[in-house]
């Protein structure tokens, strides 16, 4: 995996979590700007998914197993969009809390992906 991409994705996810957490603290639902932030974080996760898939196809293997690595890649890609979808249905502060939680989860998944690959 690309270490820089992993760090950038994790930091972006934590920034999104802080931003949506602040909105939840102020009793606000997710707004259009939050969805732009979610799109940026999702794009980073997509790039990581593509890079991981290309490296696997090129013959490289993660230290802790391909199956778990692919599962974590797919989970990290789906984490933020799923929370964004849920926040559309919950137009209260709890929608913002859901997205904030997904940002923290994505950051943890990034650390775990780094560990699985052999970092």
Image: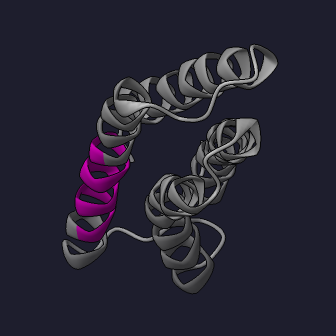
Tell which of 4 and 106 is nearer to you. 106
The image quarter in which residue 14 lies: top right
Tell which of 104 and 86 is nearer to you. 86
Q: Tell me: 47 left or right of 66.
A: left
Asked which colour scheme the image uses, the reply is one colour
Of all residues, the one furthest to the bottom in this rendering is: 67
Tell which of 72 and 105 is nearer to you. 105
Q: Tell me: 104 left or right of 56.
A: right
Vertical arrangement, residue 58 with respect to residue 103, above or below: below
Vertical arrangement, residue 101 with respect to residue 60, above or below: above
| Residue 82 point in image, percent of width and height | 52, 64
Tell which of 97 and 17 is nearer to you. 97
In magenta, the rendered stretch is 43-53
Residue 73 within the segment the image draws in magenta: no
Residue 45 within the segment the image draws in magenta: yes
Marker count (numbered) = 0
| Residue 15 point in image, percent of width and height | 56, 18
- Residue at 53%, 35% in the rendered image: 30
Vertical arrangement, residue 71 with respect to residue 87, above or below: below
- Residue at 65%, 55% in the rendered image: 90
- Residue at 48%, 62% in the rendered image: 85
- Residue at 30%, 32% in the rendered image: 36
Task: Give the dominant element type of the magenta stretch: helix, strand or loop.
Answer: helix
Quarter in which the C terminus is drawn: top right
Q: Tell me: 39 left or right of 82.
A: left
The image quarter in which residue 39 lies: top left
């Amino acid at each position: 995996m690309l270490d820089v991409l992993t760090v950038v994705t994790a930091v972006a996810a934590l920034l999104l979590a802080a931003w949506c957490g602040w909105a939840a603290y102020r009793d606000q639902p997710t707004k259009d700007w939050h969805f732009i932030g979610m799109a940026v974080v999702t794009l980073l996760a997509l790039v990581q998914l593509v890079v991981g898939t290309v490296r696997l196809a090129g013959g490289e293997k993660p230290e802790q197993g391909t199956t778990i690595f692919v599962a974590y890649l797919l989970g990290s890609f789906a984490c933020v969009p799923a929370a964004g979808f849920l926040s559309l249905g919950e137009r209260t502060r709890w929608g913002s809390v859901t997205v904030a939680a997904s940002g923290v989860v994505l950051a943890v998944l990034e650390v775990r992906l780094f560990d699985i690959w052999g970092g």
